[in-house]
Amino acid sequence: MSTTLRRTPPDYAGARPEPATSGYVSHTATAFVHVPRAEFLAWVNGRELGDLVEPGKGMSRVARTTPLRGHWDPARDRTGNRRRVEFADGNHLAEEVLADNPDRFRYMIWGFTGIQRFAVRYAVAEFGYADRDGGTDVRWTYSFRPTSPLTRPFVAAFVGRTMASMMSATLEGMRSGAERQ
């Protein structure tokens, strides 16, 4: 007989971590999208997170998001908006927008319920956008803060394999989707 463990999703009502100035393990991915920035941002902002993120090796797909603070309306500044991200494997994390304007979208994730909780304190990520040759340069950086120096090698391996593949595949999906439209 099989049993399923049901978890109550975290409410993430407390304060988010304050970003440190150093000590991160980071990865940056870039893409050039042959679409003007305003059109690219409109295309990206018109999609659900689960439709945008391509899971990396060993990573579960995003199943849904639940707004916890703010309305996540891309027509307005989303700074301070918070949501819970649920993955297909039943794990969760919190995401909060730190900066939102046409040049950059910066956010933090934390409160991992999966195995990452043992190695990662939180991560800060940023999309940067710049106009070039009638299109958009997109630069996406993810910076993970290990829980201790002992977990840094594990975080570096996760970032180098899982996050790098997820980021490249996601940017390629964004590029091809926006260019098709």
Image: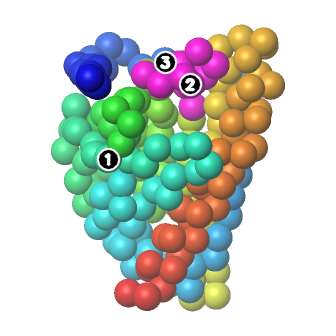
On the image, the x and y values in percent for residue 119 come to 64, 19
- Residue 17 appears in view: yes
For marks 2 and 3, the one nearer the N-term is 3
Cα distance, mark 1 to mark 3? Answer: 24 Å
* Residue at 44%, 78% in the rendered image: 177
Residue toward you, 128 or 51? 51
Secondary element at tag 3: loop
Kind of residue at badge 3: Pro
**Which range is magenta?**
113-123
Res 47 → quadrant: bottom left
Quadrant housing the C terminus: bottom left
To which residue does mark 3 refer? Answer: 17
Tell me the tag on residue 63.
1
* Figure colour scheme: rainbow
The amino acid beneath tag 1 is Ala
The disc at residue 116 is: 2
Instruction: State which mark lies toward you, 2 or 3.
Output: 2
Residue, far left: 71
Three-letter residue code for mark 2: Gln
Question: Image check: 9 left or right of 106?
Answer: left
If the image is split into quadrants, where does the N terminus sit? Answer: top left
Q: Is residue 169 magenta?
A: no
In the image, taking residue 123 as reference, residue 80 lies left or right, namely left
Query: Along the horizontal axis of the image, is 34 left or right of 113?
Result: right
Q: Looking at the image, is 40 positioned above or below residue 129?
A: below
User: If you read the primary sequence from the N terminus, does the residue marked by circle 1 or circle 3 appear first?
Assistant: 3
- Check disc 1: other Cα within 10 Å, few if <14, some if 14-19, many if 20+: some
Alpha-carbon span between mark 1 and mark 2: 18 Å
Residue 68, by quadrant, is: top left
